[in-house]
Image (cartoon, coloured by chain):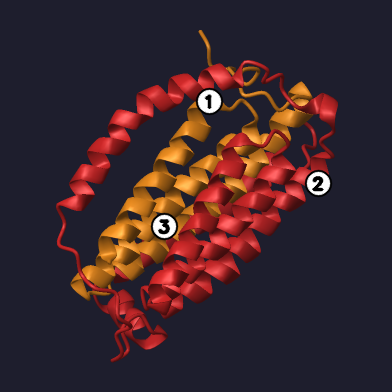
């Protein structure tokens, strides 16, 4: 049943959201964002199967490309912040606070 | 019947991996359990007869992106003393769950309204490289090119951010 796949996607998305709002380790927050992107991918592919059209597959490919770009940039930022602050706590990274 | 069993096996593995990512303290353990989630999602894509996405999920996501993340975690050489103090995280878990549960119930209700299609494997090139490529290069050509520019910008930005600075701070 497609509805089971969609429910699994919702559950994974909410777990990723929980990881983003309750953890302070920057790597865990980053991977939770990846988990939410994967849940969106599962939703795309399941709905593509439901309506038997392949546009959802193309959108899943685009999401993967965005995730790859985001991983490269975010890890560069994490290395830079770790070099400056010597810490992995997201509370330490509040540089834009006025 | 077999596909139902496979679905429940893969979904239990996926949820367990996601729970491990959210709950485990060290990011290395979290990354390892997240890889379990990614591989079982690849199995779910195969059950949904998305053959190309199945292969790309394994090669790009579980292969390239996660090995990049693992490489950076090992590169920073994170010990027990480098981890942030998360002693109050159970409070955050309870509060976050209290916030997210209504959202999850709402989304599950919305999802339940969709028509329940069956998941037999469809043939006729559905989800194959040829089928997806035809759709990609006919209907989605402009977004595809924009994605290439995005990847170029991310590449240059990563080199500028993480590269050596000479001359200035």
Give the residue at mark 1: A22
Q: Which residue shows up at 42% across the image and 78% down it?
A: B2
Host chain of mark 3: A
Please state, as top left, top right, bottom left or bottom right, where the N terminus of chain B lies in the image: bottom left
Front-most of residues A8 and B145: A8
Please report whichever mark, 3 or 1, sits nearer to the chain's N-terminal start. Answer: 1
C-alpha separation, residue under disc 2 versus residue under disc 1 = 24 Å
Host chain of mark 2: B
Label 2: how many Cα within 10 Å (few below 14, some 14–19, many 20+):
few
Vertical arrangement, residue A48 with respect to residue A18, above or below: below
Front-most of residues B98 and B131: B98
C-alpha separation, residue under disc 3 versus residue under disc 2 = 26 Å
Q: Which residue shows up at 43% across the image and 79% down it?
A: B51
Q: Which mark is residue B74?
A: 2
Give the residue at mark 3: A63
What is the x, y in percent for residue B139? 24, 73
Q: Which chain is orange?
A: A
Q: Which residue shows up at 29% across the image and 29% down it?
A: B102
- Asked if badge 3 and badge 2 are on a common chain, one would say no
Vertical arrangement, residue B15 with respect to residue A29, above or below: below
Left/right of residue A91 with respect to residue A61 in the rendered view? right
Q: Which colour is chain B painted? A: red
Q: Which residue shows up at 23% across the image and 37% down it?
A: B106
Element under label 3?
A: helix
Q: How many marks?
A: 3
Q: Please report contact status of discs 3 and 1: CB closer than 8 Å, yes or no.
A: no
Residue that protrudes farthest toward the bottom in the picture? B124
C-alpha separation, residue under disc 3 versus residue under disc 1 = 25 Å
Pair 3/1: label in front:
1
């Amino acid at each position: 049943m497609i509805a089971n796949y969609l429910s699994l996607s919702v559950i994974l998305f909410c777990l990723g959201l929980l990881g983003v709002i309750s953890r302070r380790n920057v790597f865990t927050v980053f991977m939770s964002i990846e988990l939410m992107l994967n849940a969106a991918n599962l939703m795309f592919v399941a709905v593509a199967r439901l309506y038997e059209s392949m546009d959802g597959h193309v959108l899943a490919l685009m999401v993967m490309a965005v995730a790859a770009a985001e991983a490269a940039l975010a890890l560069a930022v994490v290395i830079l912040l770790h070099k400056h602050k010597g810490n992995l706590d997201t509370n330490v990274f509040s540089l834009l606070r006025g | 019947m077999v596909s139902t069993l496979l679905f429940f096996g893969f979904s239990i593995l996926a949820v367990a991996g996601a729970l491990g990512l959210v709950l485990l303290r060290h990011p290395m353990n979290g990354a390892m359990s997240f890889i379990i989630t990614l591989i079982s999602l690849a199995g779910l894509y195969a059950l949904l007869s998305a053959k190309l996405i199945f292969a790309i999920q394994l090669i790009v996501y579980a292969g390239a992106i996660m090995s990049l993340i693992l490489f950076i975690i090992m590169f920073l050489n994170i010990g027990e003393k480098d981890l942030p103090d998360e002693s109050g995280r159970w409070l955050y878990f309870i509060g976050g769950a209290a916030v997210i549960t209504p959202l999850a119930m709402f989304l599950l209700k919305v999802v339940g309204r969709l028509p329940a299609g069956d998941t037999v494997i469809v043939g006729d090139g559905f989800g194959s490289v040829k089928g997806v490529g035809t759709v990609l290069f006919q209907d989605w050509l402009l977004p595809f090119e924009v994605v290439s520019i995005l990847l170029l910008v991310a590449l240059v930005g990563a080199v500028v951010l993480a590269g050596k600075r000479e001359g200035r701070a």
